[in-house]
Image (cartoon, grey):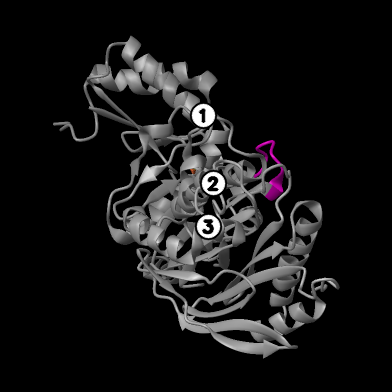
Amino acid sequence: MKRFALDIATRQFQKHGEDIAGDAFRVAQTPDSTIISVSDGLGSGVKANVLATLTVEVACGLSQGDLSLEDIVETLIATLPVCKWRSIAYSTFSVVRIYDTGRVTLAEYDCPPTLKLAGGIRPEFVETFERTVRDRNIRVAYFRMQPGDVLVQYTDGIVWAGVGQKLPMGWQEDGIFQFLSATAPALRGDCAAQANRLAEQALEYWEGAPGDDGTVVCARYRKARHAVLLTGPPSSPDRLPAMLQDFLGREGTRLVCGGTTAHLLARHLDVPLEVDDRFLDSDLPPGGKIRGMDLVTEGILTLTRAAEYLRRGIPPGRSDAATCLLDHLMDADGITFLVGTARNPAHQNTGLPESIFLRRVVAEELAAQLRERGKEVDLVFY
Amino acid sequence: MVDVRVCVGSSCHLRGGAKTLKLLHTLINDAGVQGQVSLRADLCLASCLGAPNVLVDGEPFGGVTPDRAEDFFRERILPKVRNGVGAGDRLD
Ligand code: FES
């Protein structure tokens, strides 16, 4: 499980009169790192968009292999089309790789300098040094992020905001730096809010009619939130102590899904199990309350419903044990399922397909849905 | 006090346990004996095969489907209330 996580937020606007942005942005995950690439295609409109998209796609695609960021940049430079007339590349880029450990490598090519907000509030320009890759000057940086730090990447449309209009010289890097100094403390590392504030201010300088495409990407490095979900009695009763100890020994939000499971746990902890009367009216069985647990629900039906909600969406206004469970799961970055595989003979002849009562199947389905939403999910079977 | 616990766990729920619970609640109120009956839900009474299950003063009953709720109330709960005998009451 990753111990740290990134909140990533982006805000984009296009040049006045264009209906497609010439900037592009992509995020890719590897088992131990996240790659964020931002690119500004030369010019604007469709052509610029295609070039920028190509650049970020290549960067993210390559990051899935075993390549270092340096190798990726070299390949990017080698493949970027070059404008014959102006003999400059058709797109610029900023590619940053943030490892789970907080180690960061950054490569910038012809784009505005990346900023770091230390503790989410104090801006610093990331210190870079120049390297020549295939006759081109790349700025690279190797540094560390601490939990709470935010990285801010942005494109020319932000730097030049208001140029020739409200601001004769444009906003400029220093202007952005000062703006961040002034606004970041109140935003407390809220990436979405920070990206919004920057883009809104740029748009204001452009007086609502930007002369260039603009993109802001903010990424906050923070401690990962974990959840552990216990469901079902183990295949044989003598594995119960190990299963419960495993559950109680893990850090994070504690979720219990299953009536029998809840009884077993309450007995183990020697605390009462009460029925949670919040959802008695829903068509799902109600949950319970056990001291120290964040949520106790019925098992199979609730888990199946939660997966269904992820697949099809939660009907508007719906609030039941499954939506409650999803609130907890979606809030976590990493989730461990401890799945007991005992079969309950009573689950036969209920008129429902038997496979839905196989806890393993139900848990795997929910896990797949969660992974699709970027969650890291581990399944442990007992 | 007569102690009634209705299971609303997975198996019992699928066979109408929640409805049974609601019906018993209404029946108890209609009979005006809510002061003498403590009605609670349970997440699993560990005899899922006989679902829906109800425990009356610790005595297990299976197959208490919603359509049987009224008879069940009259045969198993009401007499206990009338006799004034329940768990925790002294018999001597
Ligand atoms: S679910 Fe009712 S007894 Fe198990």
Residue A60 found in image quarter: bottom right
CA separation, marks 2 and 3?
12 Å
> Is residue A354 found inside the magenta-colored segment of the image?
yes
Q: Secondary structure at mark 2?
A: helix
Q: Which residue is mark 1?
A: A317
**Dot 2, crowdedness within 10 Å: few (<14), some or many (≥20)?**
many
Which numbered mark, 3 or 1, is in the foreground of this view? 3
For disc 3, the chain is A
Magenta span: A348-355
CA separation, marks 3 and 1?
47 Å
**Residue A66 appears in the figure:** no
Q: Which residue is mark 2?
A: A203
Q: Which residue is mark 3?
A: A170
On the image, the x and y values in percent for residue A188 come to 35, 57
For disc 1, the chain is A
**Residue B47 appears in the figure:** yes
For disc 2, the chain is A
On the image, the x and y values in percent for residue A192 come to 48, 52
Q: Earlier in the sequence, mark 1 or mark 2?
A: 2
Instruction: Point out the image quarter for the C terminus of chain A.
Output: bottom right
Q: Earlier in the sequence, mark 2 or mark 3?
A: 3
Residue type, label 3: Gly
- Residue drawn at the location 54% of the way across and 46% of the way down: A203
Q: Position of B75 compared to A311: left or right?
A: left
